[in-house]
C-alpha cells in the first residue's frame, strides 16, 4: 500500500505492507478521503493520533470498497462500498478500520465525493442534535458556515426545521451558503453580535474570541457547542451572563472518542442523515479534488482558508 506520511512536520510518500484485518476489522481499498484541519494540526505536531491508529498517516475519513474482512465481521462483505470516520490512516491507498465504524455508501453517490461526507456530516449531526439538542422551530448560529462541517450543518439544521444563521469573513461564502438554505448571513467581525438575534444553539467552528459572541447571542438555556479552534484555544468568558442565562457550553471532538462512541455517532448518522444524502435532499459541497500524488498541494490549499466546502484527496 502507498501512504502519505508525516515526517518531521513535512509530508512524504511511503510504500508499506498491506495490513491484514483481524477479528472485527475490515481492510478497505480507499477511493477518496477528505482533508480536515485536524490533519494540518497533526502535520504540525499539535494533534497526535489516538492510540491504536497510525501515528504518522493522517486522514480522518474515507470512502472505499471492502477488500478483506476479519473472522469476527458480521455484516460486511468483500466488495461492499463503505465510508466512515477513523482516528487516522485515511490518506493512503488502503486502511484498516472496524466494521462498526463503517456505513454503507448510497448507490447514487460518487465514490470520490463520498470521501468528503463522513467527517462533515457525522460531526454536524452530532453537534447539532446529540450535543446541542436542536429541535424544529429553533434558531441555530453556525460560525464558519463556509467550511465542510459548516455547509453540512446548514443543510442538516434546515432539514430539521430550524432557522439557520451563519457567519463568514467573506460575502461570497455567505451567498453560496444561502443556496444551501442558510436563512441569515452575517459577516464575521468584532461587532457581529449586534446583527444577530437570539439563538437557541451555537455551533462554533472557530473558537477563540468568538465565544464572547456566542454567550451574548444565546437566549436563556441556550447551548454552545465548540467544535473547532481556528481562531485559537483561549477566550475571555463572561461567567455572569453564563449563569444568568443558564447556558450550557460544551466542547466536542470525534477523533478523541473511544471507538464505541464513534460507532454510536455513525449509527445516528445512518438513521437520520444517510437517507437525506440518498434522496439528494442533502449533499457534500466539494471545493477541490486532488490526486494522492498532489497531496502536498491539497494541504497547502487548505492552509489558505480560501476554500468553500470540502477538500478531497482521491486515493484510488
Image (cartoon, helix red, strand yellow):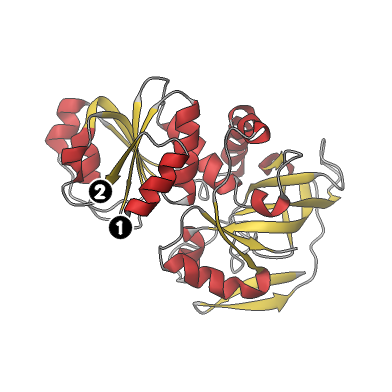
- Pointers 2 and 1 in contact (C-beta within 8 Å): yes
Q: Is residue 169 visible?
A: yes
> In the image shown, does 102 or 302 lie closer to the viewer?
302
Where 169 sits versus 214, above or below? Answer: below
- Tell me the crowding category of disc 1: few under 14, some 14 to 19, or many 20 or more residues within 10 angstroms, Cα based: few
Report whether 131 appears left or right of 139: right
For the question of whether residue 24 can be seen, the reply is no
Label 2: how many Cα within 10 Å (few below 14, some 14–19, many 20+)? many
Where does residue 278 sit, x and y in percent of width and height?
Answer: 68, 34
Which residue does the image show at 69% across and 65% down from the upper left?
92
Residue 210: numbered disc: 2
* Of pointers 2 and 1, the one earlier in the residue sequence: 2
Q: Is residue 275 left or right of residue 301?
A: right
The numbered dot on residue 231 is 1
- Considering only vertical position in the picture, is 214 above or below 163? below
Q: Can you say whether 19 is above or below 245 in the image?
A: below
Dividing the picture into quarters, in which one does residue 28 lie? bottom right
* Mark 2 and mark 1: Cα distance apart in space: 8 Å
Image coordinates of residue 208 in percent, x first then y, are 27, 53
Quadrant that contains the C terminus: bottom right
Amino acid at each position: 500500500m502507498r501512504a502519505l506520511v508525516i515526517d518531521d512536520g513535512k509530508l512524504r510518500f511511503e510504500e508499506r505492507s498491506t495490513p491484514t484485518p483481524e477479528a472485527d476489522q475490515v481492510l478497505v481499498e480507499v477511493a477518496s478521503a477528505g482533508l480536515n484541519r485536524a490533519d494540518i494540526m497533526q502535520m504540525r505536531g499539535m494533534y497526535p493520533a489516538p492510540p491504536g491508529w497510525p501515528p504518522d498517516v493522517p486522514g480522518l475519513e474515507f470512502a472505499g470498497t471492502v477488500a478483506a474482512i476479519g473472522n469476527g465481521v458480521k455484516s460486511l462483505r468483500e466488495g461492499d462500498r463503505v465510508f466512515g470516520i477513523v482516528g487516522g490512516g485515511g490518506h493512503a491507498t488502503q486502511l484498516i478500520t472496524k466494521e462498526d465504524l463503517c456505513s454503507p455508501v448510497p448507490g447514487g453517490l460518487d465514490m470520490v465525493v463520498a470521501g468528503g461526507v463522513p467527517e462533515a456530516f457525522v460531526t454536524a449531526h452530532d453537534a447539532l442534535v446529540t450535543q446541542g439538542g436542536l429541535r424544529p422551530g429553533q434558531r441555530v448560529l453556525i460560525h464558519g458556515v463556509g467550511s465542510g462541517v459548516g455547509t453540512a450543518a446548514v443543510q442538516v439544521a434546515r432539514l430539521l426545521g430550524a432557522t439557520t444563521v451563519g457567519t463568514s469573513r467573506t460575502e461570497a461564502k455567505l451567498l453560496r451558503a444561502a443556496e444551501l438554505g442558510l436563512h441569515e448571513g452575517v459577516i464575521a467581525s468584532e461587532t457581529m453580535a449586534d446583527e444577530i438575534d437570539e439563538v437557541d444553539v451555537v455551533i462554533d467552528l472557530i473558537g477563540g474570541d468568538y465565544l464572547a459572541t456566542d454567550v451574548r447571542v444565546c437566549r436563556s438555556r441556550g447551548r454552545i457547542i465548540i467544535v473547532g479552534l481556528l481562531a485559537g484555544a483561549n477566550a475571555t468568558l463572561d461567567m455572569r451572563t453564563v449563569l444568568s442565562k443558564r447556558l450550557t457550553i460544551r466542547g466536542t471532538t470525534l477523533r478523541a472518542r473511544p471507538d464505541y462512541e464513534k460507532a454510536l455517532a455513525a449509527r445516528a448518522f445512518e438513521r437520520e442523515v444517510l437517507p437525506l444524502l440518498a434522496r439528494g435532499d442533502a449533499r457534500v459541497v466539494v471545493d477541490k479534488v486532488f490526486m494522492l500524488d498532489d497531496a502536498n498541494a491539497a494541504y497547502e490549499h487548505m492552509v489558505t482558508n480560501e476554500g468553500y466546502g470540502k477538500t478531497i484527496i482521491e486515493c484510488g
